[in-house]
Structure formats: C-alpha cells, structure tokens
Amino acid sequence: MMALRTAYGRDQRDRDPAYYQYFVAKVPDSALCEPGTDLRVLGIGSGSGDVDSAILKKLLQRRSSVYIRVVEPSGELIERYKTRVRIDTNLGAVKFDWRQQTAEEYFQTKDDTKFHLIHAVHVLYHVEDLDATLRNMWEQLADGGYMFITIKSGKDAGGKLYYKLWEKFGKGDRLKTSLRTSVDVEQWLDARGISYDVASEDVAALNIDISECFNEKSEAGMKILDFLTQTPHVSNMPEIRAMALEHMRCNSSVVNGKRTSLQSRERRYRSIQKMRIKVKICLLLRAYELLLIIKRSTFHNGLNVHMGGSASMLFKETLFF
C-alpha cells in the first residue's frame, strides 16, 4: 500500500479537487425526476464517499433533499464515509441508506425501488458477473434517469498489457478476473445496439513512476509490479515479469532520471495517430478512465450513452496460472 502511494506521489484521498469536479460537471443540470418526487441515487461501491459527496452537493443545488442508497462492502470505508457526512454540513439534507454489501449481495436482495441516478465508479473490476451487474443496474434505473460508470481504459499501454499477459498466460474467462476495461463495457453496449460517443478529458492523466520495478531488490518496486500486472508475487514468475517489464520499457520514457510509463488513448472520430500521454500511478492505477453516462429514455427501450475520457483499479487477485 505504501509503495503504491509513494509511486503515486500523494495519498489517494488527497486528490486534486479538479478530479471530483470532473464528475460534477457530468451531472445533468436538467431535472432527473418530477417536481415533488424524491430524487433517489444508488451508489455501487461508493467507498469513502469522495465522488458521492461532490455529486450530491451538485444535486442539492436544485433539490431540497436527496436520498442515496450506499452499497459498499468495506466497513472501514463506510465508517470513513459516515465521518465525512458528520463533518460536512453541506450534506445535511441528504438521507443516507447504508448497505454494507457486495454488489452481488445487494442485487440478490434488492427491492423494486427505481433510482434517478446510479453510479459505479471503478467497481466493475470486482463484481463476479459483469453482464449481470450491468443488467441489474439498468433494471433499477428509473425512466429518464442516468447511470454513470467509470472504468479503466483498455486502449492505453496499461490496458494493452493486461490483454497481452492474458493472451499468453491466462486460463479460463478473463472477464471472471479483475482484468476488465472499457473495451469490455463497450462490447457489452455494442452487442445491444447501444450508440455512444467518446469525448476526451485530461483531468485524470497522471504519471506512473515505474523506476523501481526494474530493480529486482526493491520490495516497493515488486509490489508496484504486482499491482500493474494484477498478479500477486509476480517477481516469482520470471516469464510474466519479463514480458511485463519489456512492455513497460517499450512504452515509457525517462524523466528527471526516473522511468515513467507512457500511456496512449485512442480518440474517436479523428484520423491522426494515437497520442502518447504521460500518466502516473497512485494507490489506484490511473491510466485513462472512461466515464460512461447512460440515460434511460422514456420513449424507447434503448440506451443513450455519452462517454467522457478520464482509470482506476483496486488491487484484486488475478490468476494467470
């Protein structure tokens, strides 16, 4: 944990406010529900409430009160969230419904409540069934409501590393592991004939200091490499380690004596080559994220999706053997 924070350069909780404003800017200004109706929000994997609080404050600008159902399996993170709520008086008009559950546990016991805004920020890496989770979220979305999904881009160097490793060493279904990216969600949408746009954002671009990963004697470097490959104790797996380091070496540059990972992002609707954009590692891997904003239309059964570029993954065991 400390190794990742060191590489990131600061504690994940001390993130630039611009990052949270990125989400706030995507919250629709238009009414999410009829006047006199309680505005209902569902947070899947809300963590300690960093993103939630920013979104809720935006919603309270147009509503006297907001109801949010917080689904989060970590008791520690829920307690941090509750502490935030006690301290931040701006959240006083929010009605919190705390559910210490995994996404699977919650959806197994869900009621018929429909929500006007549902979000899953860097959660889809950890759910057991990606298809079922997306389907369950959609079923709980009210007509005219919005669904926000933030997930790691699969089109930068970091995402391509996952596919490369899985192609050579993976067994079984990759989607049963944490190696899920925006590409998988896009395919899920495409399979259902859902149209969407991709817009670019640089607010989440960070530099990954991977210098220590090339030092076999560096405990911190090995932990960072574990994280980047999503493979525990990868230093004991020579073939995987060698492939990962070679990929990182080919997609990085030396800045101020340190090797930093260069990630690339593919822009939709352009004819120029992919740009090379520096990104940084932190407690969470921030290469590029895709923020999918999905509106449930009251006129048809399809989805209208707008995607804003912005990646993050919490460490979860992945099996390459």
Image: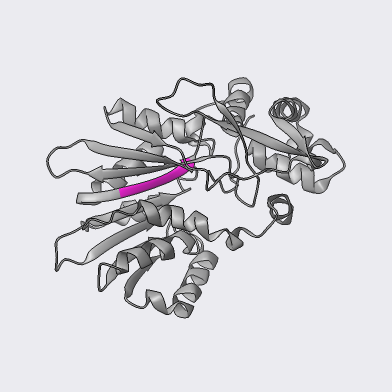
Q: Quadrant of the C terminus?
A: top right
Q: Give 136 or 162, whichever is nearer the viewer.
A: 162
* Viewer-nearest residue: 137 or 158: 158
| Front residue (pair 229, 316) | 229
Residue 209, horizontal then vertical, whole percent: 73, 43
**In the displayed structure, does residue 58 sit left or right of residue 77?**
left
Is residue 135 left or right of 239 when viewed as pictured?
left
Q: Main secondary structure of the magenta part?
A: strand
Q: 247 or 306: which is nearer to us?
A: 306
Residue 178, magenta (yes or no) = no
Picture coordinates of residue 133 (x, y %)? Answer: 36, 43
Tell me which residue sits at (45%, 30%) in the image: 183
- Residue positioned most to the right: 217
Establish if 281 lies above or below 42.
above
**Residue drawn 18% across and 59% down?**
33
Residue 147 x %, y %:
31, 48
Q: Residue at x 49, y 60 (%)?
A: 47
On screen, 13 above or below 257? below
Residue 99, placed above or below residue 220: below
x 24%, y 38%: residue: 303
Bounds of the magenta span? 147-151
Q: Is residue 146 left or right of residue 24?
A: left
Res 270 quadrant in image? top left
Q: Position of residue 165 (x, y in %)?
A: 63, 26
